[in-house]
Amino acid sequence: MSSQLDSMRNHGDVGERRLAVILESRAESANVAESLIDELSQGRYGEKQRHEIVLAVREAMANAILHGNRFDVRKRVYLTAELDELGMRVSVRDEGEGCEPERVPDPLASHNILRDSGRGMLLMRACMDEVIWRRPASGGTEVIMTKYFAQLPAVPCSTPK
């Protein structure tokens, strides 16, 4: 995997605050994505938040590779991430037929509990602060996930006397 990771770094912009790589539709690419995102988040998030971010990215990559590109080696997965003053935004885009998240069965419904798949979207929503799915003009599906550095504290309201 380390040679694939080095190869991906050479093809992407792995700066201190931005990442953009193109990955193959192979299961190993989820490991590469997880390592890159973990590296980018180090020193900026606590251990729990970093775990949540890499879990969400792993699920997004698995969906892109399996459900989007259907392991078609001619299709790619596009991973971008950017840090700003509020947090990290990660995008995973495939070249598949497209997905309609509202049509994905509820994994918590009693008749879906024992299914082998179907929990990825639920996990992404649970781990990240914002998750948006969209269908780009170029085709496929893109999931954009945001993890803020910290929740802003509530400002107490004062009433004039």
Image: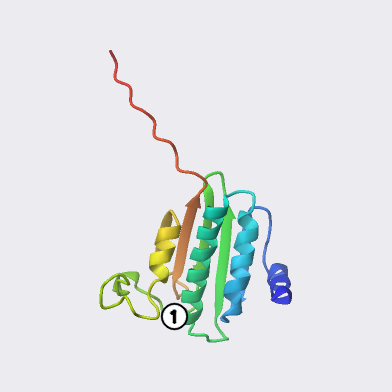
Q: Which residue lies most toward the left here?
A: 110
When the figure is inspected, residue 112 is found, relative to residue 125, above or below; the finding is below
- The colour scheme used here is rainbow
* Quadrant where the C terminus is found in the figure: top left
State the image quarter where residue 13 is shown: bottom right
The quadrant in which residue 11 appears is bottom right
Percent position (x, y) of residue 54?
Answer: 54, 63
Q: Amino acid at mark 1?
A: His
**Residue bearing the label numbered 1:** 67
| Residue 129 in view here | yes
Residue at point 45%, 59% (across, down): 127
Residue at the image position 49 percent from the left and 53 percent from the top: 147
Tell me if residue 102 comes above or below residue 37 in the rendering.
below
Q: Is 39 situated left or right of 94 in this image?
A: right
Q: Nearer the viewer, residue 85 or 50?
A: 50
Query: How many numbered markers are drawn?
Result: 1
Q: Secondary structure at mark 1?
A: helix
